[in-house]
C-alpha cells in the first residue's frame, strides 16, 4: 500500500505498535464496545511515523510543526472538515498545514485509497482506540489513542525521540503500592472523570511541565500539621486561610448543562496552581486541593535520618525498578522531594524538571522505602 520508511525507528517500532492496537481492539470488540477505530497495519504506522518525523525537522516561517495525525476514514470523524481534493501524505504538505492545525484537539485525518495514504481534512472527533501520532517538537513523536471511557488524557503507547524508542509497559501498573495517578495514566479501560483525584493531578502535572521552569508539588493529608516539621520556617508564601479555589471547584455539584463551563473553570484553577510551582521552592497542597503555601523550602525532620535509597522505575519496556541513591535521578528538587516523602510517609510529591522530566515520589509500605516513578513518557 505504501512506500517503506527512511526513518529507521519507524521501521523498528511499527510491528510492536500494530500488535498493541490489534490486542486492544480485539478485546474491545469482544466486550461489545462500539465506535471503534480501524486497525492500523504496520506498513501504515511506519509510513505515518516517517512523514511525521521528517516534517518535525522542517520549519514554516521560522516555526517547527506541532501537529496531530489520526488514522481514520472521514465517515468516522463526526463532522469533519473535508478538502475538495485529498492531499498526499508527505513532510512538505504536513509542514504547510501545521500553522492552521497546531491548537490542541485538532487532528489531521489520514486514510488510504487502497494503494496510497492521503490527507482528507481535519477533525475534532475521533473514535475509540484511534491511532494518533503527535509531533511535539523537532524529532519527538508520541504515539497514542483516545481512552474508551469518560474524560482523560489520551493514552500514550510509545515515544520516539530521534533514534530513541520508549514503548509504554502497561503491566508496570500492577506493581505494589502503585500511585493512583500512574494507574490512571496506564489503565486504558477505567472509567475516568474530570474531578477524579488522579485526573486532577494529571492535569496539574501536564500544566507544570508546560511552563518549562521546573517545580515541585507536595501533597499532604488534609487537617494535619505534621508536614510542617519538614519545612524550613518562616515560609515565604504561607497562606492563611488556605486558598480553596481548586478545592471548592472539585467538590462542586454541577448540572450537566454547565459541564463545559465547569471544565474551563477547572483548567483555569489548575493552571493557576501550576503557575505557582515556577517560583523557587515547593508548592504545598492538601489531598483536598487546598493550597497551603508555595515557595517553601524543605528540610530533614529533626527525628529523621538522611534518605539513602529509593526504588526508581519508568513505565516503559526496560524501565524495571532499581534501588538507587536519590541524588542519582536528579538535582536538588528530586532529593528534597524524596527526603520529604521519607519523613512524611503519607505525603505525595510531584517534581518537574526544566528539561521536561517528571517524577512521582510516594512511600511504599511493601518495599519499606520511597518509590520514584518517572512518568514524562506518559504526559507528552
Image: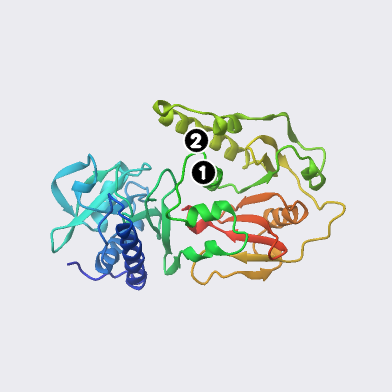
Q: On screen, 129 above or below 193?
A: below
Residue occupied by mark 1 = 203
SS for callout 1 = helix
Q: Give the number of callouts.
A: 2
Check if mark 2's residue and mark 1's residue have beta carbons within 8 Å: yes
- Horizontal and vertical percent position of residue 350: 62, 50
- Horizontal and vertical percent position of residue 345: 73, 53
Q: Quadrant of residue 310?
A: bottom right
Q: On screen, 295 above or below 345?
A: above
The residue lying furthest to the front in this view is: 31
| Residue 356 in view in this figure | no
- Horizontal and vertical percent position of residue 253: 51, 28
Residue in view at x 43 percent, y 68 percent: 165
Residue in view at x 81 percent, y 60 percent: 306
Q: On screen, 301 above or below 260?
A: below
Q: Quadrant of residue 243?
A: top right
Residue 267 lies left or right of residue 106; in this view the side is right
Residue 114 lies left or right of residue 297; in this view the side is left
Residue situated in front as seen by the camera: 36 or 46: 36
Residue in view at x 54 percent, y 69 percent: 319
- Horizontal and vertical percent position of residue 21: 33, 63
CA–CA distance in space, label 2 to label 1: 8 Å
Residue occupied by mark 2 = 267
Q: Quadrant of residue 131?
A: bottom left
Q: Mark 2 or 1 closer to N-term? A: 1
Residue 379 lies left or right of residue 108; in this view the side is right
SS for callout 2 = helix
Residue 369 lies left or right of residue 116; in this view the side is right
Amino acid at each position: 500500500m505504501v512506500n517503506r520508511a527512511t526513518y529507521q525507528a519507524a521501521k523498528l517500532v511499527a510491528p510492536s505498535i500494530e500488535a498493541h492496537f490489534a490486542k486492544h481492539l480485539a478485546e474491545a470488540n469482544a466486550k461489545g464496545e462500539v465506535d471503534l477505530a480501524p486497525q492500523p497495519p504496520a506498513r501504515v504506522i511506519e509510513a505515518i511515523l516517517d512523514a511525521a518525523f521528517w516534517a518535525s525537522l522542517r520549519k514554516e516561517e521560522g516555526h517547527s510543526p506541532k501537529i496531530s495525525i489520526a488514522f481514520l476514514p472521514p465517515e468516522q470523524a463526526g463532522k469533519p472538515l473535508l478538502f475538495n481534493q485529498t492531499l498526499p501524505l508527505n513532510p512538505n504538505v504536513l509542514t504547510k498545514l501545521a500553522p492552521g492545525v497546531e491548537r490542541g484537539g485538532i487532528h489531521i485525518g489520514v486514510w488510504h485509497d487502497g494503494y496510497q495514504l492521503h490527507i482528507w481534512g481535519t477533525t475534532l472527533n475521533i473514535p475509540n482506540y484511534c491511532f494518533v501520532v503527535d509531533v511535539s517538537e523537532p524529532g519527538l513523536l508520541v504515539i497514542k489513542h483516545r481512552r474508551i471511557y469518560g474524560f482523560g488524557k489520551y493514552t500514550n503507547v510509545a515515544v520516539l525521540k530521534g533514534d530513541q524508542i520508549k514503548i509504554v509497559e502497561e503491566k508496570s501498573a500492577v506493581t505494589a503500592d502503585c500511585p493512583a495517578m500512574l494507574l490512571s495514566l496506564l489503565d486504558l479501560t477505567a472509567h475516568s472523570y474530570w474531578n477524579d483525584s488522579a485526573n486532577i493531578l494529571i492535569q496539574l502535572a501536564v500544566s507544570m511541565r508546560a511552563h518549562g521552569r521546573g517545580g515541585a508539588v507536595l501533597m499532604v493529608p488534609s487537617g494535619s500539621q505534621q508536614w510542617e516539621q519538614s519545612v524550613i520556617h518562616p515560609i515565604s508564601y504561607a497562606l492563611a486561610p488556605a486558598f480553596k479555589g481548586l478545592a471548592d471547584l472539585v467538590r462542586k455539584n454541577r448540572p450537566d448543562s454547565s459541564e463545559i463551563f465547569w471544565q474551563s473553570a477547572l483548567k483555569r484553577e489548575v493552571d493557576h496552581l501550576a503557575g505557582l510551582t515556577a517560583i523557587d521552592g515547593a508548592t504545598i497542597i492538601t489531598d483536598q486541593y487546598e493550597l497551603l503555601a508555595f515557595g517553601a523550602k524543605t528540610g530533614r525532620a529533626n527525628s529523621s535520618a538522611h534518605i539513602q535509597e529509593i526504588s526508581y522505575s519508568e513505565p516503559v519496556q526496560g524501565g524495571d525498578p532499581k534501588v538507587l541513591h536519590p541524588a542519582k535521578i536528579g538535582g536538588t528538587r528530586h532529593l528534597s522531594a524524596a527526603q520529604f516523602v521519607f519523613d512524611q510517609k503519607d505525603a505525595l510529591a510531584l517534581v518537574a524538571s526544566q528539561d521536561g522530566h517528571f517524577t512521582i515520589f510516594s512511600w511504599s509500605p511493601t518495599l519499606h522505602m520511597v518509590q520514584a516513578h518517572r512518568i514524562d513518557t506518559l504526559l507528552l
